[in-house]
Image (cartoon, rainbow, N blue to C red):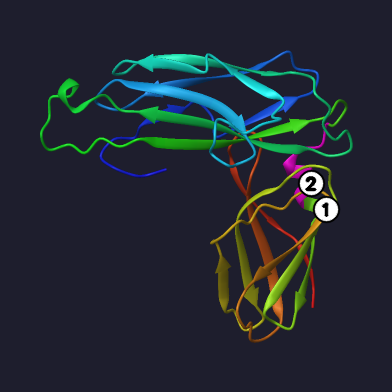
Amino acid sequence: MAMNAYCGVMPSQSRIIYHEEDKEQSLMLANTNEYPVIVQTWIDRGEGNPETASIPFISIPPIFRMELSDIKGVRIIYNKDKLPSDKESLFWFNIYEIPPEKKEFNSDNSVLITMNTQIKLFFRPKGMIITPEEAVKKITCKTKNKKIINCYNPSVIHLSVIKLMIITEDNKIKEITEGDLMLPPLSNKNFTTGYISGDIRKLTITYVNDYGDILDEAVNNDE
């Protein structure tokens, strides 16, 4: 999402947790721009394309206008197409905003741009009750050649990692914050650290829970 003087259309939450038992989920959108916008919403797998096929969710309404300071609700409905029953599935909710024509906006000094904001939508099959706080405690990591850390997520949900922090025995600190840090369910993932001098004394994962809270957890690391 591009950053400018305005915040754009802001969602009421940073993620959507959709349980299979839910009839629908909803969220609120607030227009914090200094002008009205046309908003288009849809769900995809991260492509940012409303024409993406075979997505088992719809958003209602799909297109609408928001005036200055307007707040509107959007409903998300699962169409019951089959999804994996043994692990969580990840989708993305898109908020695409189109600004007005220049003549509608009374400022010669402003640059109006289109923006697409994406937030994660996690689909949890029936009976899946594990939380990120529980899942992160199951993570195990291994150092490879002092340049790579391989982490295994044995849980059935995704873990939204935003940082790995490494502290060595000689108290040197290295942080990994760039790239896709998401740990998918039942999967291994390599994180490139660059050369690590000395043994690792502590490895901490910073992650986001279901409520958008940012939390830290020290995880097991095998040299």
Q: Does the magenta run of residues contain 220?
A: no
Question: Magenta region: which residues?
Answer: 129-136
Q: Position of residue 99 (x, y in %)?
A: 30, 28
Q: Position of residue 62 (x, y in %)?
A: 52, 18
Tag 2: Cα neighbours inside 10 Å, few (<14), some, or many (≥20)? some
Viewer-closest of 28 and 96: 96
The N terminus lies in quadrant: top left
Is 72 situated left or right of 122 in this image? left
In the image, which disc is placed on residue 70?
Answer: none
SS of the residue at dot 2?
Answer: helix
Q: Mark 1 points at which residue?
A: 138
Dominant SS of magenta comes to: helix
Residue at image x 58%, y 42%?
47
The amino acid beneath tag 2 is Ala
Residue at image x 37%, y 21%?
38
Residue at image x 63%, y 70%?
166
Is 138 situated left or right of 6 in this image? right
Q: Mark 2 points at which residue?
A: 135
* Res. 176 image quadrant: bottom right
Do tag 2 and tag 1 residues touch (Cβ < 8 Å)?
yes
Residue at image x 15%, y 23%?
103
Q: Position of residue 36 (x, y in %)?
A: 29, 20
Is 103 situated left or right of 186 in this image? left
